[in-house]
Amino acid sequence: AHAAEKVDNNETISTSINEEHSTHYERGGLRWCNLGVSVTSCPLTTAAMLDKYSNAATTTIDSIDDDITKNNDHCLEDSSWLLHPTSGYVPRGSLCGIIGPSGAGKTTFLNSLGGATVNGGLHVTGTIYYDDGEQQQSQRLSQQNGDIAYLSQHDNFFAMLTPRETLELAAKLQNQNTEIDGNKELVEKKLSSLGLLHVADRRIGDRTKLDGGGGGGGGFGLRKATKRAGGGAASGLSGGERRRLSVALELMTEPKIFLADEPTTGLDSSQAGKVVSLISKLAKDRNIPSICTLHQPKSSIWKMLDEFILLAPGGKMCYAGNRNDATAYFKEIGYECPHDTNPAEWFIDLVTIDTDDLEQGTKDIDRINFLHHRFLESCTSLHAGDEQACLDKQQLATNSKDAGTDNRKMFSISRTLQRFGALFQRSL
């Protein structure tokens, strides 16, 4: 279905990609170098993986001129990787969508960016750091310090609380040194900016109990036509309102990046569009990179993206860059997106493996390896000379971490006690 003659036009492709990223670097943002996730220890870089695809028919472990690779020959097997090593960049003020079929490693990649894959026996290689606009300051980010906002697939709330009470509690937990009036002002600002003022005093409710029927009670008595301030029957929040409340919770701090794992899960088409539009707006208003995984985005959501990342099964990255340049890039390497087709759906189909037809499945794997190889070539060209820079950034971050360990321990103890006090006060 994707038959086309593969053209050899690396110079043109590399030039366009380099020009695009040169502009991005001036804006600052989130960068990753040789980022990979494996089930066993595999210290291979993006450049080292290129030999695997350069000539798949003749490449053997003895033909690779790389001592690290020779000593880790198991790392050449696809089964060793959940996310193959790549390098990339998402600029500040942009919304980046991660798309791909099931099993492509979208959530694994997002978790690795947020530092959430260190547990569970997985091995993460490479470096992730944040650059300011002039690239004069680089730092490693942490969810614990409030640098990273992470919106998970499923909303978790205290069903008996209202959105206002939920945000007030979050403000006390996150901003212990802020005066009460300051916290209230922050809460009102979040409620207003995210369109939650009209339900600010309505109980959040439990959607599973509201929808499940059975018995007459239904959750916390929310089916009864009792009224609360804010208007409307106390029937709990809708799916879209719960999603917006989740976003508000993550923005109680001042994160440097915003990550969202399938933020449109469980929402209808209209609500899904509103949530993605909200994330896009916060990326631009706060001038931070926002990255989210998306499952089969519709055309209107696709057009909201500034950047996108295409992952194939096994975590093979086939594209990472500006959305507007994607169709031209794939056309240049032999795969042209048909007119009147949602590009997002077409890209996902392009990296999907047919598991029912063995012959077609083999062709699909060959196509994916070709696309991944071409992307690795563009990565190597783009980040040429960055290997030492990545190591320097990693060493700088390690030294900084060692120097501030004692201060962070004292801060962590103080913060834990303050949070315990806030929870105890809430329980009274």
Image (tube, grey):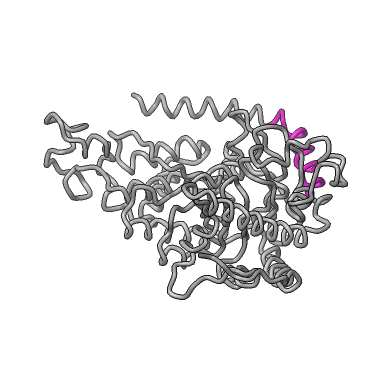
Q: Is residue 162 left or right of residue 319?
A: left
Question: Within the magenta stretch, is there residue 393?
Answer: yes
Left or right: 284 in relation to 88: left
For the C terminus, the quadrant is top left
Compared to residue 99, the image places residue 145 above or below, namely above
Quadrant for residue 416, please give it: top right
* Whole-percent x, y for residue 192 in the image: 36, 55
Q: Residue at x 76, y 56 (%)?
A: 136
Q: How many numbered marks, from 0 up?
A: 0
From this view, report whether residue 56 is shown above or below residue 142: below
Residue 18 position, x and y percent, is 72, 68
Q: Is residue 132 magenta?
A: no
Report the front residue among 147 and 66.
66
Q: Which region of the structure is painted magenta?
A: 390-407
Residue shown at 12%/38% (left/top)? Answer: 224
Return the x and y of residue 393 as percentages of the image width and height.
78, 47
Q: Residue at x 31, y 48 (%)?
A: 239
Q: Is residue 297 left or right of residue 362?
A: left
